[in-house]
Amino acid sequence: MKPIKVMIVDDSAVVRQVLSSVLDADPAIQVIGTAADPLFAQDKMQRDWPDVIVLDVEMPRMDGITFLKKLMAERPTPVVICSTLTEKGAATTMQALAAGAVSIVTKPQASLSKFLINASDDLVNAVKAAARANVRRLGKDKPLAVPAKLSADAVMPAGQSAMSRTTERIVAIGTSTGGTQALEYILTALPRVCPGIVIVQHMPERFTAAFAERLNGLCELEVLEARHGDRVMPGRALIAPGGRHMLLKRSGAQYLVEVVDGPPVSRHKPSVDVLFRSTARAAGGNATGIIMTGMGDDGARGLREMHEAGARTLGQDEASCVVYGMPKEAMKIGAVDRELPLAHIPAAILAG
């Protein structure tokens, strides 16, 4: 296997050095060049085109968004956004994801040593996921050392659902790489009158708030970053906040969410497995579970638990996925009732 060729574009020489050292330490990755801005990068890329670009969004001469749009129009290439944990950085990153970037890593700021210790796996995994991404799918449907891999038992023990069927339906969606564009497609296609929706999108802390705010401005239904105790109701979609798990609960005749801390599950926080397990418990046959584009297997076991609890379970098909990883793993273990192309999922949600 040839190593994944990476170009790093960032106006900070220190950040370029840190990112290069992290990526070059993995034998599956080769940093073929770095550049202080997109104009320098374009010159270097003409000589040796990378498999993945790690891109800052705020740079002199040409900003990352302009470069990304030009890249996707002329020669689509997987891009990982390296952004700061600030309100401005989060908002700009949402524009980058909408323009075709496949994932986000948070840029090291004050403590580069802390980044090297705590976040190097995130960067390496993001680059590897991006290398597998089918970036030509993006927009088509629009109108290593690793930590111990925990299961959902670490947050919520397994148990049987005792929920009987009711008229109120719940939709639980889990997604990762490529999911921001896929979720935008689905949620903008839904009318205000639709079932309550709970969503886990793998995304760093603080970015989920900007993502929810952006979708809320585009959609007929209300889209919010979930807070502990928020009600799940028709016409509302709640997105799990980055860095926290989200669980569905039932209180009398109402559904609500619990937002809790805990260890990463299936190496993610929030975890799709946690959301799906809680949905199986709280909603049983009143729920629909949907697993979509993303690398890895987070959500596969939770979706099977939903299936066993009587829920309807759907998977995004390979042809419409940016990365056919999570749906593939769910299919392997018999968790998916039916696979659908992305363009058919909004109608399936409304059909119940």
Image: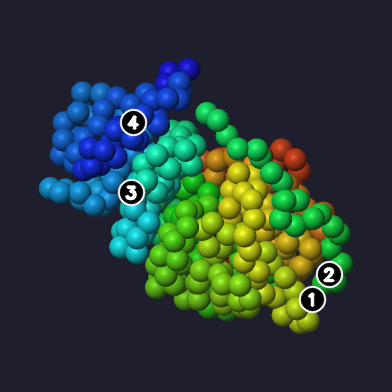
The span from disc 2 to disc 3 (Cα, nearest Å) is: 47 Å
Closer mark to the observer between disc 2 and disc 3 = 3
Please give the name of the residue rendered at 19% of the width and 28% of the height, measured from the top-left corner.
44
Q: Nearer the viewer, residue 71 or 103?
A: 103
Nearest to N terminus: mark 4 or mark 1: 4
Nearest to N terminus: mark 2 or mark 3: 3
Please give the name of the residue rendered at 57% of the width and 77% of the height, measured from the top-left corner.
235
Please give the name of the residue rendered at 58% of the width and 59% of the height, measured from the top-left corner.
244
Q: Nearer the viewer, residue 58 or 216?
A: 58
The reply to whether dot 2 and dot 1 touch (C-beta < 8 Å) is yes
Nearest to N terminus: mark 3 or mark 4: 4
Give the percent coordinates (x, y) of residue 198. 61, 66
Give the percent coordinates (x, y) of residue 127. 43, 36
Task: Confirm whether residue 157 shows in the render.
Answer: yes
Residue 20's label in the rendered image is 4
Disc 4 residue type? Ser
